[in-house]
Image (cartoon, grey):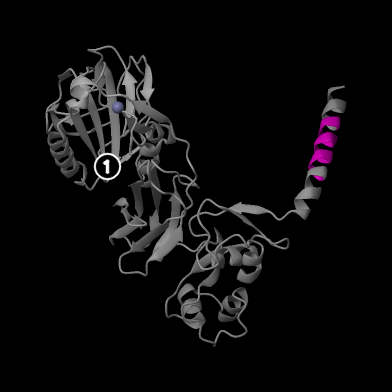
Amino acid sequence: MRVVIIVLLILAATTVSRLGNVPAAMQPATQTVQAGDTWTALALRYGVSVDELQAANPHFNKARQPAIGREIDLPDHAVERSGTLIRTGGAGVLEVAALHGLPVWEVARLNSLESPYRPTFYRPLLLPGDGTIRDLPPGMTALELSSPMASPGRALGLRGTTTRVGETITANLDGLPVSIFSVDNRFAGIVGTGAFYRGGEPELTIQVGDAPAWVQPWAFAEREWEYQELTLTGQAAEIDQQARDEERARLREIWTAVTPQPLWLTQFETPLNDVLGITANYGARRSYNGGPYLTYHEGVDFSAYGGTPVYAPAAGTVVLAEPLYVRGGTVIIDHGIGLYSGYYHLSAVHATAGQTVQPGDLLGEVGTTGLSTGNHLHWDLLVNGIWVDAAAWQQDGLACWLLEGIGRACLPPSEPE
Ligand SMILES: [Zn+2]
């Protein structure tokens, strides 16, 4: 009886998959664009011409590479094949074939060239191999992004491997610097965009040593934000703008210094064990006393009883531990490679500047010092001087993803007490 049921199930499964194939064959297959999926690489991988690929995707701008994260339609006759795409600069087929120990005519045939003796200057060449055909930055053998599609306010990561060990890797997202650190042939890096980042399809530019720069747009998803109307009265309304500006300028100097290596060793834990709730998320648009929404909430607000202990979420160096005018009792931790976390409105500060902290070390106690209307912890996270979403950083597991990128094991977070 059981055998009969299994056979029936297999038959049912086969029928469903067969039916499922009918509309799939009529509709072009789609593919999420990843780093290195240039028009040339996609055309070579699927055995179609760049013109055919662009004709199947009329909504894409032909003058730019396809944006990472977008869905691209493949022509009906697309069949995936493997290989290695190389950009040789000046070297032609003869030189490349000799260098890789391959028959010249095979390389010519693979690249649809009538003769290996014709010059192919600056044209990418395909070599046989098992890998996915991608057009990576010259000098790189792998490149991976932390999320296929980016979104504003999130810390974004990249990691990969290079053949040019010891050479400096530089990268930026439409001018925003990416902090990069390497160990041997591996590298990882982070970039932060703020909650007001315009998004769209900014260009990611990467360069290894003096090799030519590589550029590909990265698509940003729209993000929903909260809107908050706040009314300031009394002391909070009579804010001393000069004191506020001075505090900000001093902190900016701290936040933009970059320690070259990551100091954290674990996933980031939540800095409080006893939380009553989250009263304001990162990125919430704020209007004060009926004015326009000109600012956004730069951190996460945890509501907690006064005196609740605040702990370091991950390892780092305390770079500031003192009372400030706006932020009240403050502790700021440098986690390395331009990543800083901050803890504000503390009623007591127990850390000291210069101290090395481990996850779970006591930083201070929840309070309502500075410009604050009740006991809470304001927790913020910055990448290269730009506020990013600390909650998303935890959710995305980026701390470990980056460490794994340079071949370091990430220790698991300890259980909350
Ligand atoms: Zn806050």
Between 108 and 356, the residue placed more toward the observer is: 356
**Which quarter of the image is occupied by the N terminus?**
top right
Q: Which residue is mark 1?
A: 262
Specify whether 210 is left or right of 22. Answer: left
Residue 303 position, x and y percent, is 33, 17
Q: Residue at x 47, y 48 (%)?
A: 220
The answer to whether residue 345 is above or below residue 201 is: above
Residue 179 position, x and y percent, is 29, 50
Q: Residue at x 28, y 39 (%)?
A: 382
| Residues packed near mark 1 inside 10 Å, few (<14), some (14 to 19) or many (20 plus) | many
Residue 55 position, x and y percent, is 65, 66
The answer to whether residue 137 is seen in the rendering is no
**Which quarter of the image is occupied by the C terminus?**
top left
The answer to whether residue 144 is above or below residue 335 is: below
Element at badge 1?
loop
The answer to whether residue 278 is above or below residue 381 is: above
Residue 369 position, x and y percent, is 18, 20
The answer to whether residue 319 is seen in the rendering is yes
Specify whether 404 is left or right of 131. Answer: left
Between 42 and 1, the residue placed more toward the observer is: 42
Question: Magenta residues?
Answer: 8-18
Residue 9 lies in the magenta stretch: yes
Residue 409 lies in the magenta stretch: no
Q: Write down the quadrant of residue 264 in the picture.
A: top left
